[in-house]
Image: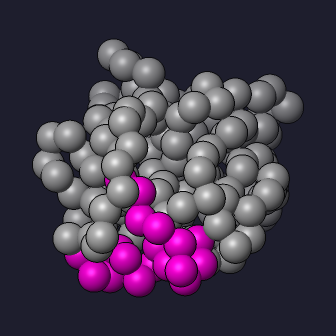
Amino acid sequence: MAQDCLILRDATTGAELLGRASLVKFELDTGSEVKIPDNWVMGHDVVGTIMKPCDLRIMPCSGRKYISACDNDLVCRIAYAYFGHGRQLVETTVEIPTGPWHGLGRVARVYYARSGKFSGLYHHPFKMDAPPVLLFKQDSGEGFRLTLPPGCIVDSHGFVWP
C-alpha cells in the first residue's frame, strides 16, 4: 500500500470507504490462521453509508488514481487523521463483498500493515472476555467480513476496542 491516503470507491454504489490496512492475517481462537492475499485491502465504512461501521470488509482492489478531494468531507477528515495531513488522496476501486456468509470463527488477533504517519506492521489482540470478534468468508466469492461488536472503536490509532 502506498504512503498516501487510500480511499476505496465501491464499484456498485460509488460509496467511499477508508482503506485501513493491507497484509492482513487473522489468528482464530482455535490457533488456526487465515491469511489474506497481500494485495488485498481492509475497507472501513467510517460513516456507515452502506454498512455498519463495526463491519469491515477485506477485498481486492484495482487501479489507483490521485484525487483532490473526497465526495464526503468526513471521509477525507478521517483519512487525513489516520494517514497524516499533507498526504495525497489516492482512490482505488473495490467491489464490496456481500453475503451470504459462512463463519470461520472467533478472531483472537489481527495482523496488518498500515501506511502513512504511523506506517508499519501491527497486531491487535482481541480480549476473549470481551464480546466476540467474528470472521466470515463470502459463500460465492473471495471476500471476507470482520464483524466487531457494537460500540467498537477503530480510529486514527487503529483497532482500539475490543
Q: Quadrant of the C terminus?
A: bottom right
The answer to whether residue 9 is seen in the rendering is yes
Identity of the residue furthest to the left in this view? 13
- Residue positioned 35% across, 74% down in the render: 75
Report which quarter residue 12 is drawn in.
top left
Say which of 66 and 54 sits in front: 66
The location of residue 149, given as percent across then percent down, is 53, 63
The location of residue 22, given as percent across then percent down, is 62, 44
For residue 110, side relative to residue 9 (left or right):
right
Report which quarter residue 138 is drawn in.
top left
Q: How is the image coloured?
A: one colour
Say which of 4 and 161 sits in front: 4
Residue range highlighted in magenta: 72-91
Q: Is residue 88 magenta?
A: yes
The location of residue 52, given as percent across then percent down, is 34, 62
- Residue positioned 21% across, 57% down in the render: 15
Say which of 66 and 95 sits in front: 66
